[in-house]
Amino acid sequence: MKCYRKILRIPWTARRTNQNILQELGMKERQLLKNIEQLKLKYFGHVVRHNNLEKLCLDGAVEGRRGRGRPRRRWTQDISDWLGFSVREASILAQDRDGFRSAVWEATSYKDPP
């Protein structure tokens, strides 16, 4: 919503609802977030299909003690939340390009609210 407000040049002090801003842009929901989700899922499929440094970083674990405070949200947690699978199941599905594409499309398609 911050990006949409910048596009419309609405200051952060203006008391306007998010629905009002989306209406002004002619949108039903936040499409920018869905586009980011889709690109992130596509990149996950690309990384998992190839044997490279990114895949090693994705699968690897760091030795040592955990830091203080609340654990940070991990990149793989977004993947599993959006697809509805575990990361292991998603990486197996990513080996089949067509199956993974349909899963990504289903996860990021615009659904009308009930």
Image (tube, rainbow, N blue to C red):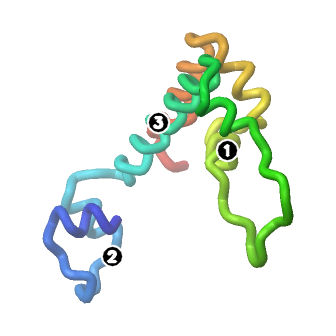
Q: Is residue 4 above or below residue 57?
A: below
Q: Is residue 63 above or below residue 100?
A: below
Q: Nearer the viewer, mark 3 or mark 2?
A: 3
Residue beneath disc 2: 17
Residue 52: percent from the left, percent from the top?
A: 60, 24
Mark 3 surroundings within 10 Å by alpha-carbon count, few (fewer than 14), some (14 through 19), many (20 or more) = some
For the residues bearing labels 3 and 2, Cβ distance under 8 angstroms: no
Q: Secondary structure at mark 1?
A: helix
Residue 79: percent from the left, percent from the top?
A: 63, 41
For marks 1 and 2, the one nearer the N-term is 2
Residue 98: percent from the left, percent from the top?
A: 56, 11
Is 112 positioned to the left or the right of 51 in the image? left
Is 13 positioned to the left or the right of 85 in the image? left
Q: Secondary structure at mark 2?
A: loop
**Residue kind at label 3, given as amino acid type:** Gln
For marks 3 and 2, the one nearer the N-term is 2
Residue 38, numbered label: 3
Q: Disc 3 versus disc 1: distance between alpha carbons?
A: 14 Å
Q: Disc 3 versus disc 2: distance between alpha carbons?
A: 26 Å
Residue 25: percent from the left, percent from the top?
A: 20, 56
Q: Which residue is at 60% across, 20% downward?
A: 100
Q: Nearer the viewer, mark 3 or mark 1?
A: 1
For marks 3 and 1, the one nearer the N-term is 3
**Residue kind at label 2, given as amino acid type:** Thr
Indicate the quadrant where residue 89 lies.
top right
Residue beneath disc 1: 76
